[in-house]
Image (cartoon, helix red, strand yellow):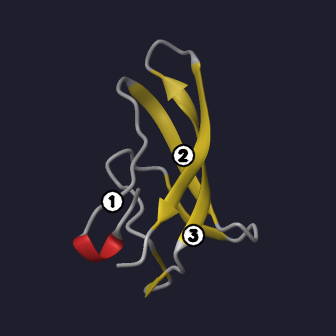
Amino acid sequence: NLTAPSNQVFNPVPSCIACYELRIYSNAGLLVFESDDPEMGWDGYYKGQLCSPGVYLWKVRGTYRNGEPLIMAGDVTLLNY
């Protein structure tokens, strides 16, 4: 769970990544975050505003250092405190 007010950041990065792209979407399909930096995760904000509490879909695509493709997806819940 991601709780932005307590300054937590969601970052589903496995180790040994050669290239990487993280995208996070609202339940309406709006792209609220994207990054190609494995060190940068989502803090719950979109365009400077904290997103509404709820479930967001995340997708990661990339390549491991050994050349194997990386494809992961899931959901993260943004809580309101």
Cα distance in 3D space between marks 1 and 2? 16 Å
Q: Is residue 42 left or right of residue 72?
A: left
Which residue does the numbered mark 2 point to in the structure image? 21
The tally of labels here is 3
Residue situated in front as seen by the camera: 2 or 63:
2
Q: Regarding mark 3 in the picture, which secondary structure is present there?
A: strand
Which quarter of the figure is the C terminus placed in? bottom left
Q: Nearer the viewer, mark 2 or mark 3?
A: 3
Label number found at residue 9? 1
Which badge, 2 or 3, comes first in the chain's sequence?
2
Say if residue 59 shows up in the picture.
no
Which badge, 3 or 1, comes first in the chain's sequence?
1
Residue situated in front as seen by the camera: 25 or 38:
25
Cα distance in 3D space between marks 3 and 1? 15 Å
Q: Regarding mark 2 in the picture, which secondary structure is present there?
A: strand
Cα distance in 3D space between marks 2 and 3? 22 Å
Q: Residue at x 42, y 77 (%)?
A: 80
Kind of residue indicated by mark 2: Glu
Which quarter of the figure is the N terminus placed in? bottom left
Q: Residue at x 62, y 40 (%)?
A: 73
Which badge, 1 or 2, comes first in the chain's sequence?
1
Q: Is residue 52 left or right of residue 80?
A: right
Q: Nearer the viewer, mark 3 or mark 1?
A: 3
Label number found at residue 58? none
Which residue does the numbered mark 3 point to in the structure image? 54
Residue situated in front as seen by the camera: 75 or 15:
75
Q: Within 10 angstroms of label 2, few (less than 14), some, or many (20 or more) residues?
A: some
Rendered view: 73 above or below 41: above
